[in-house]
Image: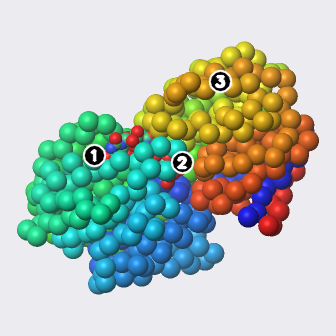
Amino acid sequence: MDSIVVTGGGPLSGEIPIAGAKNACLALMPATLLSEDPLTLTNAPRLSDIKTMTTLLQSLGAEATGLQDGQVLAMSSHDLTSSRADYDIVRKMRASNLVLGPLIARFGHAEVSLPGGCAIGARPMDLHTFGLEKLGAEIDLRDGYLFAKAPNGLKGAEIPLKFASVGATENIVMAATLAKGTTVLTNAAREPEIVDLVKCLRAMGAQIEGEGTSRIEIQGVDRLHGATHQVVADRIELGTYMLAPAIAGGEVECLGGKLDLVAAFVEKLDEAGVAVEETERGLKVSRKNGRLKAVDVTTEPFPGFPTDLQAQFMAMLCTADGTSELNETIFENRFMHAPELTRMGAEIEVHGGRARVTGVDKLRGAPVMATDLRASVSLILAGLAAEGETVVSRVYHLDRGYEHVVRKLRGVGAQIERVKA
Ligand SMILES: CC(=O)N[C@H]1[C@@H](OP(=O)(O)OP(=O)(O)OC[C@H]2O[C@@H](n3ccc(=O)[nH]c3=O)[C@H](O)[C@@H]2O)O[C@H](CO)[C@@H](O)[C@@H]1O
Ligand SMILES: C=C(OP(=O)(O)O)C(=O)O
């Protein structure tokens, strides 16, 4: 297995281009199942998760091809040969469960494995099935699979979600586009990835209002047509690279970054002593002056502080003055980077969903192990300013969500390389 070697060094300087969002693209790709016409996505990120979703769509009989170095995805699903999302794929990638809504809506049946849990916690689907059943789907759980059918088609309904689940909102909105009548989804997720999905569905002919608010109204239509859609910028990749100059010093401009994608995160950066300036090309980040200050953070659904940036933010707090409290409210096991950061000299205590981080002067490089996607990149960020060499193993986690991480960080002067196994 490959590893990544980072040697802590001086300030960073330059530009980092931000890719299209993994978590948007993984919801946009299943939307191809809603129409027999082609769907083209531009600005797709080049990631192993996107390849996995491509494989899943192909296993259903869809055509899915990456063009121009994978940045353009051309997909179409005229006739499907299967409606089964196998456990082998779903357990590797949670987002595979996003084929459920589109399959039921267009073909009237689907068999989708439950994802079970993953390293960061449980990935239940009760809210997805609650919404789809309200639309008239009949869903049984057998052998670890959701068997869903809607022999008479779906019908619009009022669907109050008890938690603003991103995945459930995506599945329900996609299914409702082809349901008869009006669906009103309340307590819907407001994430930018939902807004992006709705924009694409609208380009395909769907009638939807309210994306980005907690009330989404969908007027079902008979069919959707083809479209071309540009994937929104990845706010998590953006936040990750914004932390690089905050940790290592210097100034980095993240190209394509927008403040409204990361407002709550930027507020916390500001409190910690990091300056963020919106430019014509993106977001420019540097430390205001001197050392960083401790800040408290609670992860929340959008527009709150994102759980997907908690690990990276913790890496920064390891060398901030004072004690910070991190409260993780979305996933129950999302502090696995803490013991690895401790191996680099960080002072962190974890109690359930809370972590207390007391800043130290400097971290020291060490061999560390990546346990999940965001944990992996937090160790790389920590390594940027640590004394000596940090060797991050199990980097396949990283390949799920960060394209060209070595090239992008080298471009701003970091000493980092990938060592082939
Ligand atoms: C709110 C939130 O931050 N969601 C994140 C979550 O989306 P993802 O769609 O994976 O997760 P959800 O938003 O659905 O789930 C968030 C919470 O809701 C619970 N839940 C979810 C579905 C369900 O049917 N029943 C249920 O109880 C989960 O256990 C979890 O505690 O992970 C993605 C990848 O890291 C992030 O990009 C999303 O921003
Ligand atoms: C955990 C993540 O992804 P997934 O939901 O696909 O596991 C993530 O993007 O941080």
| Disc 1 residue type (three-letter) | Leu
Q: Is residue 45 found left or right of 108 in the rendered image? A: right
Say which residue appears at 77% left-offset and 58% top-offset: 3
Q: In this view, does 37 lie to the left or right of 237?
A: left
Residue beneath disc 3: 349
Res 119 label: 2
Q: Is residue 119 left or right of residue 140?
A: right
List x then y, in percent, for residue 206: 25, 61
Q: Is mark 3 within 8 Å of ligand 1?
A: no
Q: Distance between the residues labelled 3 and 2?
A: 19 Å
Please give the residue where the numbered disc 1 appears in the rendered image: 127
Sequence-earlier tag: 3 or 2? 2
Q: Are marks 3 and 1 in contact (CB under 8 Å)?
A: no
Q: In the image, is residue 412 above or below residue 139?
A: above
Q: In which quarter of the image is the N terminus?
A: bottom right
Horizontal and vertical percent for residue 60? Answer: 36, 78
Residue situated furthest top in the rendering: 322
Residue at x 73% of width, y 43% of height? 379
